Amino acid sequence: MTDQPTVPPAPGPGSGRLPGCFVALEGGDGAGKSTQRALLGEWLTALGHEVVLTREPGGTALGRVLRDAVLHGDDVDPRTEALLYATDRAHHVHRLVRPALRRGAVVVTDRYLDSSVAYQGAARALGTAEIRALSLWATEGLLPDLTVLLDVDPAVGAARRAGAPDRIERESAAFHARVREHFLELAAEDPGRYLVVDAAAAPEDIHAAVRARLAPLLPAPRAAAGLGERP
């Protein structure tokens, strides 16, 4: 298991003709995305799949530098923030995600482009269409085969967090409420790609719901590639 003018609409489903399967976990901070990513990794590995577990930002060596800049940097304005996320995403897809999908792996990422649409496009008011177009350009139109939205009340998510909050987590309650609202709007607009689950449910129950939705989308299992995170 390894870590990692008008714009035309993106092709779909997410991995297109690539033989792998691409899963994104979305939702507000404290929704339980890391827990569900780990549970999916264990299940998929047991089935015999090569599994790549990754995150945004920070799924590559360059991404970890960009993650530190965007989450902990000083004086990062909204447009710079959006471009840092898009830069990370472009490199992440080119370096890690697309090669894994070409090998037939199952890629599970903690956050993808819908986070940018919700956080920078909606909550930062930079324009949801503009931010989506930027990410689609950066990734050459790659969309997940399944996006799991772990829906959580922002107050509940904040109470679950451990450690000092980063600069995004320190935003106002209204900011995080707008993020949640737009995630739900995105899911309502594209139910074929989204699975919405209540993040307050037991982790095992959430995992069972995700397994049921994901199972029909999986490729034939291949030899597992082992454990650990990919740089």
Image (cartoon, helix red, strand yellow):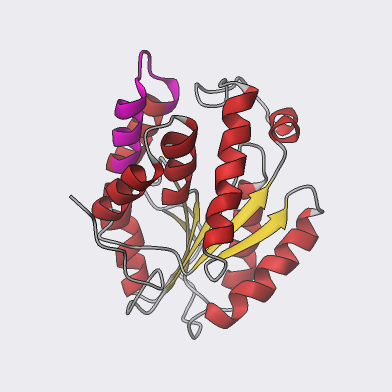
In the figure, is residue 219 to the left or right of 136?
right
Residue 80 is inside the magenta segment: yes
Most frequent secondary structure within the magenta stretch: helix
Q: Residue placed farthest to the bottom in the image?
A: 220
Q: Which residue appears farthest toward the top when viewing the image?
A: 75
Magenta residues span 71-86
Quarter where residue 17 is shown? bottom left
**Residue 55 colored in magenta in the image:** no
Q: Nearer the viewer, residue 166 or 185?
A: 185
Rendered image quadrant of residue 181: top right
In the rendered view, does 150 fall on the left or right side of 187? right
Q: Residue at x 51, y 82 (%)?
A: 221
- Foreground of the two, 83 or 104: 83
Instruction: Residue 179: give x, y in percent of width and height.
Output: 56, 38
Residue at the image position 36 percent from the left and 67 percent from the top: 100
Is residue 55 toward the left or the right of residue 31 in the image?
left
Would you say residue 26 is visible in this rendering? no
Tell me which residue sits at (39%, 76%) in the image: 104
Can residue 99 be seen from the camera position used here? yes
Q: Is residue 168 above or below residue 141?
A: above
Residue 7 position in % (x across, y down): 24, 56
Give the residue furthest to the front: 6
Q: Please tell me which residue is depicted at 64% across the width and 24% down the height of the picture.
A: 173
Q: In the rendering, at what x and y percent does residue 231 appear?
A: 36, 48
Residue at the far left in the pictured view: 5
Q: How many marks?
A: 0
In this picture, is 60 found above or below 161?
Answer: below
